């Protein structure tokens, strides 16, 4: 008897990590519902990248949900605060680019889409190694959200198990890139920079660019996206 | 030494339960930040009620966040599905008015506002007695979310404790109304109906109206809002 393919929801930001996560979910045999949240991010070019990545993976459906997180302020990614450049990655503490409760909100929205699309698995590109100090990118946060999901939902109450998957959690950026390459991810479609130029070139100096460039260098590869001089 | 008043975030839907919850939080000495989510609900008149309730309570600030949950479908409160009328309240199972992952999403947004407003307490009008069978209105859901909030946030990581309060959890609708009256809540400002007339009158026959009318009757009081004949 042939097994019916299961569907999963994957959060696609347009960045390198979520593209790799989606490729892993697809490789595991899931049909994908992609979810991208338009949270009025400064780097809106990410959403175009998310759309391209979703298309390249042949997702069943790609939902874009508008949610204006800048209402809450509190982050240089949504508010009018300068993105820090060439910051020492070893700095203590949580950086100004932290978006309050972001992954809690993203997973909640993914949970809603999972319930309405009949999916019982959610994939998120959270990573605890190169995670820039965000509390909602830690393994204990992900497993706590899984417990919550199973209490919060009609499906959970009726005995179906929701799984929250963060397959990149323990990988370095170089390992993520190597895994993505082995799964055929086209990283030229992705976008990671917190502060791109008006032409869409990456700045090369924000936390995200520094991590990405180091990841490609450590993997012995050249990043296919363009950087400002 | 005088104690500095603490602030709390309260989710205000415009309904009877959230108005009472906000009055309880105020009575406990909290300064209030109100949060209302415009989730493209069919009964948009609720948001006007939320605004009136917030004003009557003298909140510090009232944030309205737009989030189009109808993108996900799956509920007669957001999608084009008929609201059930005169349903037997003792029916088994979760009703069609269930909005997928609603309270998970609402609490996530409240958590973001709590972090950016320097609040460590969140109030929600969830109720397990007259709760119409929603899984995310149970005490175990609320305590699980509290655990998540303390793992998810910068403040939680830095040792501050987030409290999630659902003070109505164990009260009947009649007890909620009696408590609200004792705290001076003006229920004429609130709105509960899932399917109001174009003039804003309550239908009197949806789950929400039936619970509300029974609550006022059990409390020996007359509901001050208008009902369609």
Image (cartoon, coloured by chain):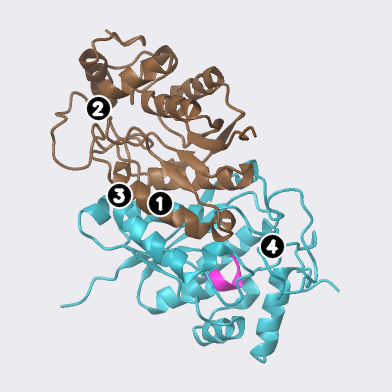
Chain colours: A brown, B cyan
Q: Which residue is mark 1?
A: A145
Q: Give the vertical position of A209 relative to B20 (above or below).
A: above
Residue in view at x 32 percent, y 61 percent: B119
Percent coordinates x, y for residue A51 in the rendering: 53, 23
Q: Nearer the viewer, residue B12 or B106?
A: B106
Percent coordinates x, y for residue B84 in the rendering: 78, 63
Residue B95: mark:
4
Q: Quadrant of the N terminus of chain A?
A: top right
Which numbered disc flags the more N-terminal residue, 1 or 3? 3
Q: Which residue is mark 3?
A: A140
Q: CA distance from mark 2 to mark 3?
A: 18 Å
Secondary structure category for the residue under label 3? helix
Q: Which residue is mark 2?
A: A172
Q: Chain of mark 3?
A: A
Q: Looking at the image, do the residues carrying marks 2 and 1 touch, with CB atoms under 8 Å apart? A: no
Secondary structure category for the residue under label 1? helix
Residue B117 occupies quadrant: bottom left
Q: Are marks 4 and 2 on the same chain?
A: no
Q: Give the vertical position of A11 relative to B227 (above or below).
A: above
Q: Quadrant of the C terminus of chain A?
A: top left
Q: Looking at the image, do the residues carrying marks 2 and 3 touch, with CB atoms under 8 Å apart? A: no
Q: Are marks 1 and 3 on the same chain?
A: yes
Which numbered disc flags the more N-terminal residue, 2 or 1? 1
Percent coordinates x, y for residue B103 in the rendering: 52, 58
Residue in view at x 62 percent, y 71 percent: B189
Left or right: residue B137 versus residue B115 is right
Q: Chain of mark 2?
A: A
Crowd rating for badge 1 (residues with CA inside 10 Å; few <14, some 14–19, many 20+): many
Q: Are marks 2 and 1 on the same chain?
A: yes
Q: CA distance from mark 4 to mark 2?
A: 45 Å
């Amino acid at each position: 008897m042939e097994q019916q393919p299961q569907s999963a929801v994957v959060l696609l930001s347009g960045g390198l990590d979520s593209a790799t996560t989606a490729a892993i979910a697809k490789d595991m045999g899931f049909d994908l519902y992609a979810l991208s949240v338009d949270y009025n991010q400064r780097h809106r070019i990410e959403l175009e990248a998310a759309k391209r990545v979703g298309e390249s993976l042949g997702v069943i459906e790609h939902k874009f949900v508008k949610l204006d997180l800048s209402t809450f302020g509190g982050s240089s990614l949504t508010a009018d605060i300068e993105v820090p450049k060439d910051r020492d990655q070893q700095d203590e503490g949580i950086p100004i680019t932290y978006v309050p409760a972001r992954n809690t909100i993203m997973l909640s929205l993914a949970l809603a889409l999972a319930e309405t699309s009949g999916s019982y698995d959610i994939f998120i590109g959270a990573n605890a190694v190169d995670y820039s100090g965000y509390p909602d990118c830690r393994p204990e946060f992900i497993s706590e959200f899984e417990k919550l999901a199973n209490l919060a939902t009609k499906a959970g109450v009726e005995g179906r198990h929701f799984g929250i998957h963060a397959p990149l959690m323990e990988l370095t950026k170089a390992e993520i890139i190597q895994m993505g390459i082995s799964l055929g991810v086209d990283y030229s479609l992705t976008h990671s920079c917190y502060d791109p130029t008006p032409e869409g070139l990456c700045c090369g100096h924000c936390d995200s660019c520094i991590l990405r460039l180091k990841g490609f260098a450590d993997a012995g590869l050249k990043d296919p996206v363009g950087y400002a001089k």
